[in-house]
Structure formats: structure tokens, C-alpha cells
Amino acid sequence: MIALTCGEPAGIGPEIAASAWQALRDALPFFLIGDPGHVPEGVPVAVIDRPSEAAGVAARALPVLAHPFPGPRVPGRPQAAQAQGVIDVIARAVALVQGGEARALCTAPIHKQALQEGAGFAFPGHTEYLAHLAGVGRVVMMLAAPALRVVPVTIHIPLSEVPRALTADLLEETIRITHAALIRDFGIAAPRLAVAGLNPHAGEGGRMGREEIEVIGPVLERMRAGGMDLRGPLSADTMFHAAARAGYDAAIAMYHDQALIPVKTLDFDRGVNVTLGLPFIRTSPDHGTALDIAGQGRASPDSLIEALRLADRLAKARG
């Protein structure tokens, strides 16, 4: 079974979890970890005591491994008293998947500010907290959609700090983690990676910046000599159209928006966040808590459904 964490109760997590169950039922069974009282009214719920019970009830009800929260869900309004519960659910889910009681982890969106203010959450986001729980020094965030897989080398830092953070070691480690995951989890025997430059026109021979000459280019040359199929550094403004995408299996971008803008533009509703480098499979819908529409019945479950499906495929590939 796939474990699905509840995410921020005030957001759309409980709604899209219910909608995903209604769409998938026992065709792709999963269980939700959270407060059964947060599930929208009218959705049948089966409270389970252990993950192994989920398969037997998924056809008729959403399986919920109960994790009580203080107070009711208030759509659109995160509550400080519930912040620790959100964090604890993530830790509980990781323990289950590491213990073999779930074969993959899918996470509903969290509200980082609410967790920081309500429970002193010390991590920039989900990805970093999962790495901490797994005891892994470095993980990589991939955004995957049917038309594009892309990995940012730097993630949740100000744009002004990217040139200083972009080191040769960081770039090489990101490429190696991505390359290994494409082989192991995506079943691509000889991955082809396209690597973006940092500056406009990939620096234009040094006239618009020297990171391509001094950092990115030497790393790629060294790794090509080791047998990897790497293209770049490429101008980011020409590497995401359809003909360019046909030439690679994943793109490596230098910073957050360089990676996320193309994948969200190409397929906003079906993009999936995949954490590479963990000892278990983790996916997540590629959107936030959407507090502005929570409780209104307007939230699309499409990205969550794709995240569950991808978690299923990756778990099967990893075996």
C-alpha cells in the first residue's frame, strides 16, 4: 500500500485525498494518515489500525490510519495547535515505509510558514525534512510530468544567492543522483541529461557571466569522460520546446524557477514532485495548500492522482 500523509488540514489536502480515492478506489489502493474527522462530509471512511488492513476496505471506503488532531479542520485557516500534528504524521509515514509496512510515500502539501510559526519547524520544506528523517545527507527534487522531467540544482534560496551556492561539487552530485534514479526507478538504461546554463544564452562565451565556463562546463566535460550522456551547458530559453525535449530524458536546471516554470506551464495539473536519493519512494503533487479555495469543492485531484500513480510505478521498478 502507498501511504499518503494528510498535509496541512486547513488546505486542500483532505479534499484531494478524498477525490483521489473516489477516482482510484481499489484500482490503486492507498491509505491516508490523518484525522478521520478532517475528511469531507459524505465520503465514506474506514478507520484502520494498521496499513495491511487498507486493501480490504479500499473498494468501499477511504482507508484512514487515524492520527487525531486537536480541534476541527477550518478550511483556509491554519491553526498553530495543529502544526505539530502535521510534522508528526510525516515522521510516522516515514517510519512505516522504512519498516516495510508501506511500499511508497506520497505527501499532501504542507504550509511551511504555519509549521514554522506553530511548531518551530526548522526545515526549509518537505524535501529537507524527509532527508533528515531518512538520515541522508543530500537528496534531489525532481518535477515530473508526462512531457518533462526537470531537476533544480539549487532550490529554496534567494536568486541572489544562487551563483555562490552553485558549486562544482553540488552540480556533480545532483547529476549523479539524477542519473542513478533514472536507471533504478524510471527504468532508463542509458539516461540522456540536458544541463542548462545559469546565465542568459548560457553566458554567451563569458560576456553574460562566467559560471558556464568556470563551473558548469568543466563538470560536464569531466563527467562525459566518465561515460555519461550530458548535453550543455545549454541556453535555458531554447531547451524546453517539444523538439528539444525529445532529445533528453531529464533536464538539469540551475535554480528553482528555471526548473519549475517550464514544467508547470506544460502541464500544471499533472506535475509531480519526486524526491530522488531517498532509501524509499516519495512523491507529492506539484502544488501548494491552496488555502484560498480550501473547503469550496474546487480543488483538482489530478496532480495527487498522478503522484500516487507515479509512486506505484517507481515502487514496482525499484522492487
Image (cartoon, rainbow, N blue to C red):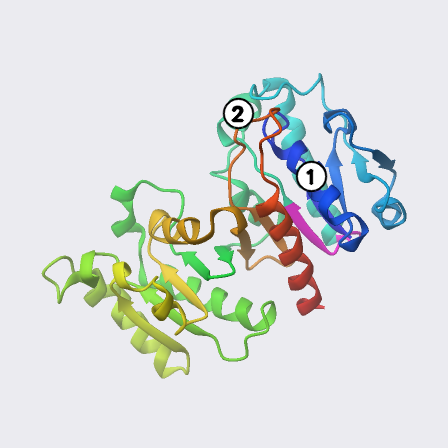
The amino acid marked with disc number 1 is Ser
**Does residue 62 belong to the magenta stretch?**
no
Magenta stretch in the rendered image: 99-106
Q: With 59 as the anchor, is 254 left or right in this view?
A: left
Residue at (21% x, 56% y) in the render: 199
Return the x and y of residue 275 as percentages of the image width and height.
55, 54
Q: Main secondary structure of the magenta part?
A: loop
Residue at (65% x, 48% y) in the render: 106
Q: How many marks?
A: 2
Pointer 1 local density, CA inside 10 Å: few below 14, some 14–19, many at least 20: many
> Where is residue 207, by image quadrant?
bottom left
**Residue 122 image label:** none
Residue at (46% x, 68% y) in the render: 176
As helix, strand or loop, the secondary structure at mark 1 comes to helix
Return the x and y of residue 54 as percentages of the image width and height.
85, 46
**Does residue 101 belong to the magenta stretch?**
yes
Is label 2 or label 1 in front? 1
Q: With 170 as the anchor, is 186 left or right in this view?
A: right
Q: Nearer the viewer, residue 139 or 289?
A: 289
Mark 2 highlights which residue?
114
As helix, strand or loop, the secondary structure at mark 2 comes to helix
> Where is residue 72, by image quadrant?
top right
Return the x and y of residue 304 as percentages of the image width and height.
61, 46
Residue at (60% x, 18% y) in the render: 79
Specify whether residue 7 is in view: no
**Residue 19 image label:** 1
Q: With 58 as the anchor, is 162 left or right in this view?
A: left
